[in-house]
Image (cartoon, rainbow, N blue to C red):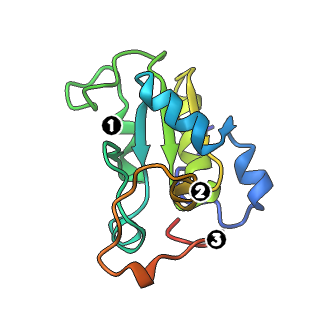
Amino acid sequence: MTVSTAPAEDLTLEEAGALAPLVDPADAAARVSDGALLVDVRSEAGRARTGAIPGATVVDRYDVDADFDLTSSLRLAPVVSLDTPIVVVCGSVRGSGPVAAALREKGFTNVVHVEGGAAAWKDAGLPIDEPADPAAWTTGPGASA
């Protein structure tokens, strides 16, 4: 069975959150500070609307297999083993949950995703670039998944 990396719009927030270990933004930031790879799977439009997270590696959710293939020279450079610590963020857990679950299915052992997504990251006072139009900032379950 292969886990889909597509947004889990048919799941409740609770169900999507349960797809992989869920951490609050402060825990996620601490993991990143300790060396975890922060992976932002929001769309380009989502990041433009809500702001980019400085230092995050942007990954297209549909390229997860290639970007995290340990046998490929084209994989993301920080991905060196199945123990690589990874924090996934999206607009909501409906977006990050499927990606985190797919990485765990691939054998990655240290993968979590951020409860509340990018909006919670911002609300926690963590660094995020303001969008081009700050009035466009949207939050909630459907925001930029």
Q: Is residue 16 left or right of residue 63?
A: right
Q: Position of residue 23 (x, y in %)?
A: 65, 38
Q: Is residue 128 above or below residue 32?
A: below
Residue type at mark 3: give it.
Gly
Q: Which residue is mark 2?
A: 120
Q: What's the CA distance linking mark 1 and mark 3? A: 28 Å
Residue type at mark 2: give it.
Ala
Q: Which residue is mark 1?
A: 67
Residue type at mark 1: give it.
Asp
Q: Which residue is mark 3?
A: 140
- The residue mark sitting in front, 2 or 3, is 2
- The residue mark sitting in front, 1 or 3, is 3
Q: Is residue 14 above or below residue 107?
A: below
Q: Position of residue 63 (x, y in %)?
A: 36, 47
Nearer-N-terminus badge (2/1): 1
Q: Residue at x 53, y 65 (%)?
A: 145
Q: Residue at x 40, y 15 (%)?
A: 81
Q: Secondary structure at mark 1?
A: helix
Q: What's the CA distance linking mark 2 and mark 1? A: 26 Å
Q: Which numbered tag is attached to residue 79?
A: none
Q: Is residue 134 left or right of residue 125?
A: left
Q: Residue at x 39, y 56 (%)?
A: 128
Nearer-N-terminus badge (2/3): 2
Picture quarter with the N terminus: top right
Q: Is residue 144 visible?
A: yes
Q: Is residue 118 left or right of residue 40?
A: right
Q: Residue at x 56, y 40 (%)?
A: 100
Most extreme residue toward the front is: 125
Residue situated in front as seen by the camera: 85 or 76: 85
Q: Secondary structure at mark 2?
A: helix
> What crowding class fits label 1: few (fewer than 14 Cα within 10 Å), some (14-19), or many (20 or more)?
some
Nearer-N-terminus badge (1/3): 1
